[in-house]
Amino acid sequence: MKNATFKIFTMSFALLFLTGCYNVHQIWIDSYQSKVGQNIYELRKRYSSPSNAYLKRGEVLLPNGNIEEASDYVFHKSDYKFYEKNGKYPCRYFYEYEPKSGLIVGFRFEEDYKHACVVSGA
């Protein structure tokens, strides 16, 4: 009976853990996706800080005339130096916006491993 109880406990804990990982990943996606339809110039003013500017990776002019802005994302602020030293962050995100209006029309992200892009909870 102890063995069965332990297995049930272990399976429940594993399921809870996996659900939690999915949730913090989905929360991160939803929070960045929610910026579509907003003005990128206003977002830059609102979120301007040295740490945010530090993670900005540049812009690319797309064939449709829009601009794609690339940024890196770090789970913990203490990880900045580690990833910068290694030259690559595990999570990168991109906003596509119209240059004249600043309207964000698209969002995408790239991860080096599953769930690299998550909210920190801090």
Image (cartoon, helix red, strand yellow):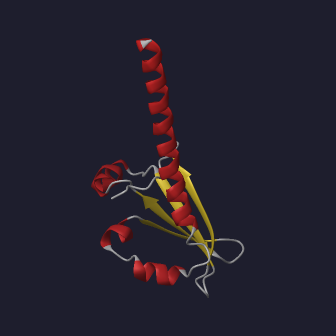
Please report the residue visible at 45 percent of the width from the left and 11 percent of the height from the top: 1
Q: Is residue 37 above or below residue 75?
A: below
- In the orientation shown, which residue stands out farthest toward the front? 1
Residue 98 sits in quarter: bottom right
Q: Is residue 46 left or right of residue 67?
A: left
For the point 49% across and 27% down, the residue is 11
The residue nearer to you, when weighing 2 against 103, is 2
Numbered marks: total: 0
Q: Nearer the viewer, residue 92 or 18?
A: 18
Report the quarter where the C terminus lies. bottom left
**Rendered residue at 39%/51% (across/down):** 87
Asked if residue 49 shows in the view, the reply is yes
Residue 15 position within the rendered picture, expressed as x and y whole percent measured from the top left: 51, 34
In percent of width and height, residue 77 lies at: 30, 58
Is 106 placed above or below 113 here?
below
Would you say residue 113 is visible in this rendering? Answer: no
Q: Position of residue 8 (x, y in %)?
A: 48, 23
Out of 9 and 102, give the one closest to the viewer.
Answer: 9
Q: Residue 110: x percent and y percent?
A: 55, 53
- Direction right: furthest residue: 64
Q: Is residue 14 above or below residue 105?
A: above
Direction from residue 31 to residue 75 in the image, left or right: left
Quadrant of the image occupied by residue 74: bottom left
Q: As rendered, which of 2 and 60 lies closer to the eye?
A: 2
Residue at 37 percent of width and 69 percent of height:
52
